[in-house]
Amino acid sequence: NYMWTHPDVIVIVSGGQGDDEPMTEGQAMYDELVALGLPAENIWIEDKATSTRENISFALDLIEGKTGSRPDTLGVVSSEYHLFRASLIAESCGVEFVGIPANTSRLSQYINHMMREVAGIWQHLILGG
């Protein structure tokens, strides 16, 4: 795992809470990473985002708030089908994007989400968003 070979890296887990969710996505990811043995002090929680644009924008704001400066490069871990759109959004937020794919294990889920992702890419390209 990248975290064990790079112990000083900071991870930002990002995501708000849907109406049908018992906790924020950020908190759920934090809890899972800590349970896996990652150091809690290296994991920052952003718990308001409701979209990829907000995930990236709010993460950049959190970094700037904690460090005093905005990064030039942002590494993003996401599903492999989602990285292209995330790269477009990161670029529009003014940062260089490094995509780190998390593979989807079920083919049916991959196909379903890839089709949705194509619509999201078109929306971004046409509406900026």
Image (cartoon, rainbow, N blue to C red):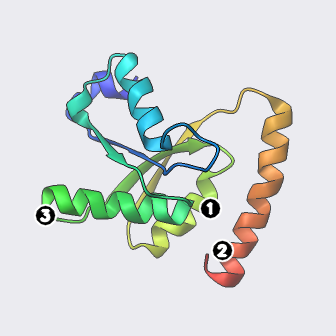
The kind of residue tagged 1 is Arg
| Residue 45: % across, % down | 34, 44
Disc with the residue nearer the chain's start (1 vs 3): 3
Report if the CB atoms under discs 1 and 2 are less than 8 Å apart: yes
| The label number, if any, that marks residue 124 in the structure image | 2
Residue at screen point 59% across, 50% down: 18
Looking at this view, name the residue that lies furthest to the bottom.
127
Label 1: element kind: helix
Reply above or below: 56 against 32: below
Left or right of 27: which side holds 63?
left
Residue at screen point 37% across, 28% down: 2
| Residue 111: % across, % down | 84, 43
Q: Residues within 10 Å of mark 3 (few under 14, many from 20)?
A: few
Reply above or below: 28 against 26: above
Position of the C terminus, as image quadrant, is: bottom right
Left or right of 89: which side holds 62?
left
Label 3: element kind: loop
Residue at screen point 64% across, 51% down: 82
The kind of residue tagged 2 is His
Label 2: element kind: helix
Q: Residues within 10 Å of mark 2 (few under 14, many from 20)?
A: some
